[in-house]
Amino acid sequence: MPNYYLVRSPEVLVKDGFIGYGWGAIPFVEFDSANSLIEHMRSKKINLGRQEKQIRRFFNIQPGDIVIVPVSRAIYIAQAMEERLYERGVVFGENRIKVNFVNKEGVPVRIPRGSLTNQLSSRLKIRMSVVGLNGFGDEINKLIEQAKSLSLKEVGYRNAVQQFQEKAQAEFEAEFLAALRSGNVGLESGGYGLEKLIKELLVLEGYEASILGKNQGADISDIDIKATKNDWLGDQVLYVQAKHHKGHSDDHGIKQLKAIEDPNDQDHVVTKLFVTTGTLSDEAISLANEYDIRTLNGEELVKWLVERLDDLSADTKLLLGVVSVPQLHRYP
């Protein structure tokens, strides 16, 4: 029986029949096991945190395993093959595995996300690079059979329309991010508007969230938003520090989260999240990795917003300047 995986591989690799993963400074092909790779990383004083499981999953993908590659509004499905290589030139895709994408006469089939069940669609939104999907094997197999049954014309039409959608969305996201960073939106100033926006997103994700007052403690520690969710894993507690920045965000916000003492109650699963409209400095990324603090930069925040755009309140969409206008694309 094959294993099933989600791999957030750069789409540019699809045309060459590969999936890729990051860690561009470390060629995975030089190691004979995931354990030896992890040991090497630790010897280099790399704090892996939650990324260790993702590295192991990617390394352990075997020939015959099934991989889903999510792209904007669609997915590709592929079967892993034997060949592995390391090659620079594609950021976050240096370590590669050869795959055979589900295709029609050599054209990889893009499967619209609307074809997926809510459960699988929600699973694909998880913010990790490599995720196990074994619980969705039956559904994925059905999608493969459906994709194989399409005619070449149907594949061409679907791909053309989806590419048109992706181009339009990429342009929208870039413009949206520029407006968000510059403050050229209707959100309240001083960072409070950003906090309210993140709080609304968290509520849509099933959390109970509240914006906390400033300077809760005498030291550097600070939380902008506290969110909780109760599920079968127990009480999920999320501490969020948010910064409205145009350029780089340094490691100050990470240090504010690092200084927060975790609850002693073992029933609480605590996650610390740093969100910025800007980009993260190398120092911030390094410190976040060291202390297992999750991060969300401006591009990732915008993608989250776009995913939840239909669910945002009408008032929030108005303040963001978002309007919905249908567009028509004609297939040649």
Image (cartoon, rainbow, N blue to C red):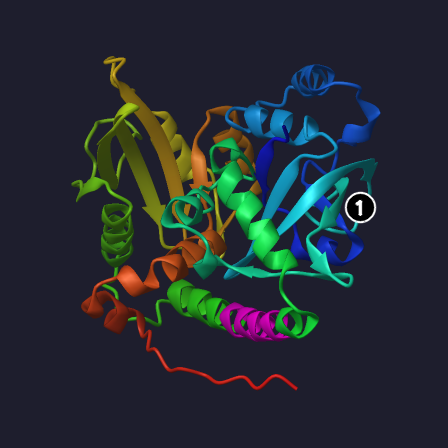
Q: Hey, which quadrant is residue 93 in on the image?
A: top right
Q: Is residue 278 visible?
A: no
Q: Is residue 313 left or right of residue 258?
A: left
Residue at 37% x, 58% y: name it: 305
Q: Which residue is mark 1?
A: 88
Nearer-the-camera pick, 240 or 268: 268
Residue at 40% x, 67% y: name it: 182
Residue at 72% x, 39% y: name it: 80
Q: Is residue 89 left or right of residue 278?
A: right
Image quadrant where one finds the N terminus = top right
Nearer-the-camera pick, 160 or 89: 160
Q: Amino acid at mark 1?
A: Arg
Nearer-the-camera pick, 106 or 208: 106
Q: Is residue 99 left or right of residue 123?
A: right
Q: Is residue 17 above or below residue 174?
A: above
Residue 282 sits inside the magenta stretch: no
Residue 160 sits inside the magenta stretch: yes
Which secondary structure type mostly characterizes the magenta part of the structure? helix
Residue 136 image point, x, y percent: 48, 38
Residue 90 image point, x, y percent: 74, 51
Q: Is residue 310 above or below residue 231?
A: below
Identify the magenta region. Answer: 157-170
Q: Is residue 11 visible?
A: yes
